[in-house]
Amino acid sequence: MANQNRRVLLKRRPTGAPTTADFEIAEAPLPDPAAGEVLVRGIYLSLDPYMRGRISGARSYAKPVDIGAVMEGRVVGEVVHSRDPGVRDGDYVVGGYGWQLYSAVPAKGLVKLDPAEAPLSTALGVLGMPGLTAYVGLSEIGRPQMGETVVVSAASGAVGAVAGQLAKRAGARVVGIAGGADKCRYVETELGFDSCLDHRSADLGAALDPACPNGIDVYFENVGGAVQQAVFSRLNDFGRMVMCGMVAEYNDVEPRPGPNLMAVVRKRLKIQGFIVGDQWQRWGEYRAMAAPLVRDGTLKYREDIVDGLDNAPAAFIGLLQGRNFGKLLVRLSSDPTRRG
Ligand SMILES: NC(=O)c1ccc[n+]([C@@H]2O[C@H](COP(=O)([O-])OP(=O)(O)OC[C@H]3O[C@@H](n4cnc5c(N)ncnc54)[C@H](OP(=O)(O)O)[C@@H]3O)[C@@H](O)[C@H]2O)c1
């Protein structure tokens, strides 16, 4: 075990796109767990688009990270020193331990992971918060029916990949939208979407028409911006827009004008946002459904793993520009359960 901790702190609130100068990497003493606490060595740190909101000063549904505080984030780790009889050294856990190598956390309420159930890293992606997000958004808002057309943006990403695969399982025709030929090829050939369109190509709207000959019944919205505009005007009567996120707009300094909402009345559309944090009680139900599908290979996922805590700020900045390909994780230390 190291005798120092290493942490990424928020140095200042960015205006527009964040830069690495907005973060500070700092050494700190190794946390000393009190009675009833455990010391966790981080293995994987999850980097997620919502973190852009946490480093902004704007009012939101969650409290922002304070200047000088450790960046917020979910981590899978190993207990290396337990001071609680209910937790053993060597237990694997997942929780919001932040962008740091070690953390001392209360044993009460710890969520343990069984590496025999699924690879540890999946607790941050396909079987974790992003997977649950796809499940909740689709089952509560999108509700795709057999034969309907579902469009999913950021389709190769952590949420989009699951949303599209679940929509396929519901019998829908599923069209992905992703950035670049490699991502689109993956979405079609590996994830099994019916087709995938590159939003960087010249005219997304013109490409959507032949890909969705019967219009669009459900749009699982992950990016906003020009993609949203192209999809919105093609929604069918009684269409549903699952407002999951708008990552393409997170670095905007001024909010962009939205679509004209008369179409919502005329087409009787349903547009509903949701925050997965309101639905953690459904995590067990989701894992029970999805873990066997991950184990037998029917629910596919891809991870983009960056090595080393010091590379977290740059990787996070890249996430907001579409540089990740799959669920973005930072390897904080070696995963004892993974070979190679
Ligand atoms: N409501 C909730 O509770 C909740 C929970 C989790 C996530 N979310 C939202 O779900 C969305 C996807 O999150 P994720 O974790 O699955 O991330 P992700 O899709 O794995 O990664 C983000 C992707 O967004 C796309 N993107 C980034 N910047 C873009 C830009 N400027 N223009 C167009 N596309 C851009 C890129 O994909 P392409 O290169 O393919 O465009 C990038 O790979 C985000 O909007 C996130 O905020 C919401």
Image (cartoon, helix red, strand yellow):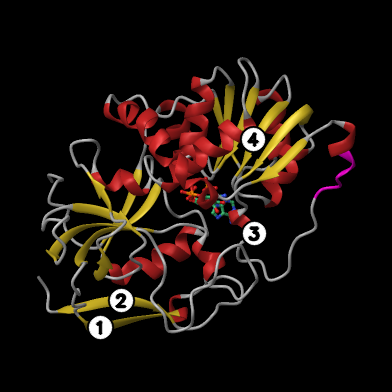
Between discs 1 and 4, the one toward the N terminus: 1
Q: Quadrant of residue 143?
A: top right
Discs 2/3, front: 2
Q: Amino acid at mark 2?
A: Arg
- Location of residue 291 in the rendering, given as x and y in whole percent from the top left corner: 32, 32
Q: Residues within 10 Å of mark 3 (few under 14, many from 20)?
A: some
- Tell me which corner region of the image, top left, top right, bottom left or bottom right, holds residue 34: bottom left
**In the image, 172: left or right of 217?**
left
Q: Over which residues does the magenta segment extend?
A: 259-263
Mark 3: is the Cβ under 8 angstroms from ligand 1? Answer: yes
Marks 2,1: beta carbons within 8 A: yes
Residue of label 4: 141
What label does residue 7 carry, if any? Answer: 2
Rendered residue at 60%/15% (across/down): 146
| Residue 74 x/y as whole percent | 37, 59
Residue on which disc 1 sits: 27
Local secondary structure at mark 4: helix
| Amino acid at dot 3 | Glu
- Which badge, 2 or 3, comes first in the chain's sequence? 2
Q: Tell whether circle 2 marks a residue whose Cβ is less than 8 angstroms from ligand 1.
A: no
Query: Which residue corresponds to mark 3?
Result: 249
